Image (cartoon, rainbow, N blue to C red):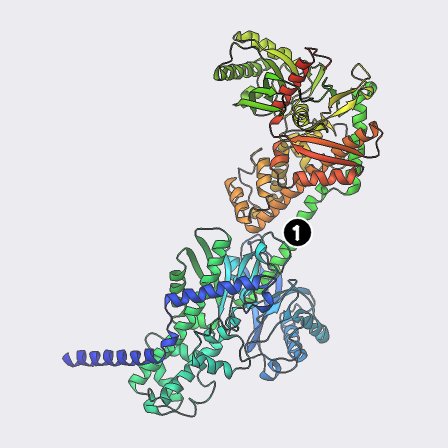
Amino acid sequence: MFAVHLVSFFFSKLKEDQIKKVDRFLYAMRLSDDQLLDISARFRAEMVKGLSAESNATATVRMLPTHVRSIPDGSERGEFLALDLGGSKFKVLRVKVSENGKRKVDMESETYPIPEEVAHGRGTDLFNHVAESLRDFMQKIDVNQKKMPLGFTFSFPCRQSRLDEGVLLSWSKNFKARGVQGTDVVESLREAIDRVGDIDVNVLALVNDTVGTMMTCGFDDQRCEVGLIVGTGTNACYMEEMRHIDLVEGDEGRMCINTEWGAFGEDGALDDFITSFDQEIDAASLNPGKQLFEKMISGMYMGELVRIILLKMARSGLLFGGRVSDALCTKGKLETRHVVLMEKYKEGLQNTKNILTDLDLTPTEDDCVAVQHVCTIVSFRSANLCAAALAAILTRMRESRKLQTLRTTVGVDGTVYRTHPQYAKRLHKVVRRLVPECHVRFVLSESGSGKGAAMVTAVAQRLLAQRREVDQTLAPFVLMAKQLYQVRDRMRRELENGLRLETHATASVKMLPSYVYNTPSGREHGNYLALDLGGTNFRVLVVKVRSSRRRSVRMYNKIYAIPLEIMQGTGEELFDHIVQCISDFLDYMGMKNTCLPLGFTFSFPCRQTGIDKGTLVSWTKGFKATDCEGNDMVEMLREAIKRRNEFDLDIVALVNDTVGTMMTCAYEDPKCEIGLIVGTGCNVCYMEEMTNIETAEGDEGHMCINTEWGGFGENGELDDIRTRFDREVDEGSLNVGKQTFEKMTSGMYLGEIVRQILIDLTRRGLLFRGRITERLKTPGIFETKFLSQIESDRLALLQVRSILQHLGLDSTCDDSIIVKEVCGTVSRRAAQLCGAGMAAVVEKIRENRGLDRLEITVGVDGTLYKLHPHFSSILKETVGELAPKCNVSFVLSEDGSGKGAALITAVARSLGDRPVTL
C-alpha cells in the first residue's frame, strides 16, 4: 500500500515538475484576465473603425455588411438548395422547411472533395467543379428538372452590396484559386452553372459560414444573434444596429455583420502578444502578415504550432533527451486532430505516447506529460483569444441597445469547438468571467452552415413575400401629387358651397360664421374668465390682459376631467359638471363674488347667429351628451349657472377652439388670419370677405369663418382615397358616416387606423408571429401619442419594442420596423391631407384679395402637430407644393385656445358690449 502511495506521489511530483518546465518555456502564451480585457478593448476599437466609412479601408477587422437583416421567425417554408464551400471538401444540400410554423427541417446532402490542384488553380476550374458537383447532386435526388432557389455558403471574406452579390477580398484557409479575388463570386457561380447546363438554379443569397451558423441556430432559438466558427478557420458575426453601419444606407433595424476577425492584428495591434512561435507559423504560411488572429486560434494552425514548440523544446534539451526526428521536423506532420486526442481526459497520455511514437520519437513518461501540457496551453490560449473578441462583440451589442443586461445566444460550429474535449468549457467560462453583465447561451450547430445558407434563402423569400404584402396593404395610403391636387380642388369647391345660401345646407364643409370681425389690436385690457371644452379635459382660466409698451397676458388655470359617463350622458349632466368645475375654480381663486366677463371656447361645430349665441350642429371627439344638438350652448350654460345659484357670470363670447388659436397667435403676429387645430380633432378657421358670406348679413370688412372641415368627405368627396381601414374605423365610431376628413387626419382616429392595419397584418401572419392578442383587439388601445413616440428619429427599435410590449404586443425587431412604417404611412397621409386642405384655404384668400402673392401666418395648436416628429414638416411641404403663390408661415400657439377666448372677450368689451358687431 505504501509503495502505491509512493509511486502516486512520485508521478504527481514528476507531472508538476514537467508542467512548470513547460509553463516557463511558454509563459508568453499564458494570458491573464487583465491581458484579455486589454485585447477585448483593442478589438472593440477595431470594430468601430470597421463600421465607419472613413476608416473602414484601413481597418483590420473588416466588419462586412452581409445584407442579412433578419433571423428566422419559424414561419419559413419551402424547398431550397445550399452549397457550402470553405475547406478541403464542400457540401451540397437539399433543405425542406415544413409549413405551418412547425419548425421541422429535413435535409439530405452529399460531400464532394476539392483537389489541391483545383483549390490552387484557375478560378473558372474551381467554379466549374462546384457546378458539376451541384448538377450531379440534383440529378441524384431528381430535382434537375425543377427551378430551385439556392443559398451559397462561401467561407471567405467578401464585400457585399446585396444579399446575392459578393466580391472576394482575399483567400484564406489554403485556397489560392487565380482570377477570383476582386470579382463577384455569385456571378462566377452563375456563369459556371450556365456552362455546365442541364439545371435551373436561382442563386438568391451569398452567406459566410459564420452567418450560416447563426441562422441555423436562430431557426430553433430566436435569441441567437451571434455566430462563431472555431474550426479550420475562425470568425464571428452578430446583429448590429443599422444606424451604426456607415457602409449601408438606412437606419432602421439591424443587419448581420461578418467581422472577419481572423485579420485582427495585421496592423500591429497584437504585436505584444505574438510569440516567436506565431511568427514562425506566419512566415511559413501561404499569406505571410495576414490573418494573424486566425493563426493564433484556428484548427488549421493549432497542430503546426504545437509541432514548432515541441521541436524548439527538443532542440533546447527540454524534451526527448534533446533528440529530434525527421517527422518532427516536417511541416504538417502534427495536426489539430492529434492535439484533440492528446488532450482527452483519460486516454490522453496514452494517445500522446502513441502519436509521438508515430513521429519516430521515443518519449518518456515525463515527455508525454510535458507534451500534453503544451497542447493544453496552445488550445487554452486559442479559447482565451476567442473569448476576448467575443466579449467585445457582446459588450458592443449590450451598450448599443442601452441594456444593463444582455441575454443572447451564440450559435457555434467548427471542428475545434465540436471535437476538442475541453475547448467549449474553457471558452464559456472565460466569456462569462470577462462579461458578467451578459447572459450568454452557447448552442452547437447540429446541421452546419449549409443549412444556414438555406435558412438565409428561406428568410429572404419570406421577407420578400412579406414586403410585397405590406406594400400592397399600405399602397392605398400613399397619395400621389395628382390625388393631393384633387383633394385641394374638391376642398375649395366645398368651401364655396358652404358659404353660399343655396348650397350651404348640403355642403360637407359647413363654413360657420363666428361673428368675430377683427383680430386683437394690442390695446385690450382687463381681467377675463375663460372656459375651454374640447376633449376629455376641461380648463377654467383667469386671463389678465395688460396693454402698455410691453403687452402682456398672464393666465391662471386649473384642469378638470370629463368622465366618459358625463360625455355620453345627458346635456344637463354635462353642463352641471362644467358649472361645478367653475365653482371649484372660483373658490380656489377666491373670486366667487366677482362677476367677470367670460369667453367660452367650445370646440364643436356650432351654428352662430351672434358672438354669444351658438347652436350645436353635432357632437364630435367621442361626445354624445343628449338634448344638446340643435340647442344653444350659451343658453344651456346660463341655465346650469342658475340651477347652481352660487355665482353669476357675464358670458360675452362663444368661441371655437380654432378661432381661439387664431386670436391667440394674432395677438403677437398681425399677419395671423388663419387658425389650425390638429389634435384630438382637426379644424381650420380663416378671415373671409363679408361679401362672400351669404349666410350672414353685411358686406363690409371680414369675418372669421369656422370651416368645420372635419365633415369634408361626407358627400363622397374622399371615397376614391378612403381605405377599407378608414371604413372600419368609421363603422366603429359614435358618428358613423360623419366627420370623414377628421377621421383621416386627427389624433382621435390615427391610432385606431394603425390598430386596424396591425390586426390585418397579424391575421395574415405578417406581424407578431400571427398571434392577435386580446389587447390588440381592444379599440383605442393604440393611442395616437404612440405614433409620435414610435416615429421619433431618436428612438431606437429596442425602445419601439418596449412601447409595443407595454401594449401587450411581443414584437421582434422586424415587427418593430413594420409597425414604425405603418405609423409613418398613416401619419404622413394625415399631414398631406391637412396640407391639401390648407392649400385650398390660402389660395382662396389670395384670390379673394386679387394678389399675385400672399403673405400670411397660420396659428396652430393641437397635440398631433406639436408632438409628432414629422407631421408639421410634411404639412408645410405639401402646402408649399400645392399653393406655390402663397408664402405661408406657421406659428405655434403657446397658450392654447382658452387665451383666445379671453382675447375675443376683451376685443368685444373694448368695442362696448356689442355682441353681434365685434
Where residue 463 sits: x, y (%)?
A: 63, 54
Whether residue 630 is visible here, answered yes or no, is: no
Q: Quadrant of the C terminus?
A: top right
Write down the quadrant of residue 215 in the picture.
bottom right
Q: Nearer the viewer, residue 543 or 310?
A: 543
Q: Quadrant of the N terminus?
A: bottom left
Whether residue 451 is visible here, answered yes or no, is: yes
Where residue 315 sits: x, y (%)?
A: 37, 90
On screen, residue 109 above or below 437: below
Q: Residue at x 54, y 42 (%)?
A: 804
Q: Nearer the viewer, residue 100 or 308?
A: 308
Q: Residue furthest front?
A: 549
Q: Residue at x 62, y 30 (%)?
A: 680
Q: Which residue is mark 1?
A: 467
Q: Nearer the viewer, residue 449 or 103?
A: 449
Check disc 1: other Cα within 10 Å, few if <14, some if 14-19, many if 20+. some
